[in-house]
Image (tube, rainbow, N blue to C red):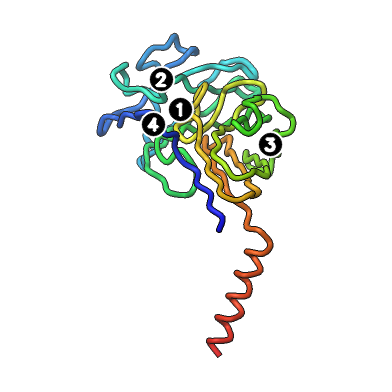
Amino acid sequence: MKKVWCGLMVLVVLVLAAPAGAAYYLAGEFNGWTSDGQLMTDNGDGTYTATITDLGAGARYEFKVTDGTWDWSHPGPNSWLFADAAGQVTVTFNENVISDGWNPTQYRIGLSTDPGAWTIAGSFQGWDNANPATAMTSIGGGIYMLSQTLDPGDYYWKAVVTGSWDSISWDARSVGTSDTYLQITETSEVNFYVDAFAGTIKAEVVPEPATMALLGLGSVVLLRRKK
């Protein structure tokens, strides 16, 4: 029987809860790391947005989301962004807890821009952030995928902007995120995904043909019993 488990590292990184009812701000290289540098707009649904302008076409900056002070900020390591061709980017912060199969499940940082080249770096490929064998393919909408056959074992991985450690993992979109843990008990094909806009990742096992055949047979038997 095949089992795959994708979750947190054994060494859990503590993510502090934001103060209740707090306003959120962006503090980063683009505003001198002022803790209340740019107020985010409260959309009334647990999401907050802010558009940063005059950054320079394609420029890269590091930043954090704060409560207006340095008493609370997210993520731990700095987050990162790339401006678009007009030198601007919209940042979204989602404080809701979301159970949709993607990670992180809370405090997601979304961007209106996509760096355009992603790689899966992990223990199964030597942590090479520019390995062409694990380069991800765009499937549209800012989502990238990589299919990889893995033998039984314990693995660690993250999605990185190719050639860098700007990454997305279970804990955040940040520089040098924590590693996501993956356990496989039978040789399996695994699909890795990253959503560049939403700032999320996931891994899914592809059912083997024999398993799919059994599932189909079970459906036939069920239909016959209904007769």
Distance of label 4 from label 1 (alpha carbons): 30 Å
40 shown above or below 71: below
Instruction: Give, as a three-letter code, the residue at label 3.
Output: Met
Q: Which residue is mark 2?
A: 38
Q: Which residue is mark 3?
A: 136
At numbered mark 3, what does the secondary structure look like: helix, strand or loop? loop
Residues 52 and 121: in front is 121
Distance of label 2 from label 4 (alpha carbons): 31 Å
Instruction: Give, as a three-letter code, the residue at label 4.
Output: Val
Crowding at mark 4 (Cα within 10 Å: few <14, some 14-19, many 20+) = few
Q: Which residue is mark 1?
A: 50
Distance of label 3 from label 2 (alpha carbons): 34 Å
138 shown above or below 73: below
Classify the position of the N terminus by image quarter.
bottom right
Instruction: Give, as a three-letter code, the residue at label 2.
Output: Gln
Tag nearer the camera, 1 or 3: 3
**Image spot of residue 160 (x, y percent):** 60, 28
Residue 12: image tag: 4
Sequence-first tag of 3 and 4: 4
At numbered mark 2, what does the secondary structure look like: helix, strand or loop? strand
At numbered mark 1, what does the secondary structure look like: helix, strand or loop? strand
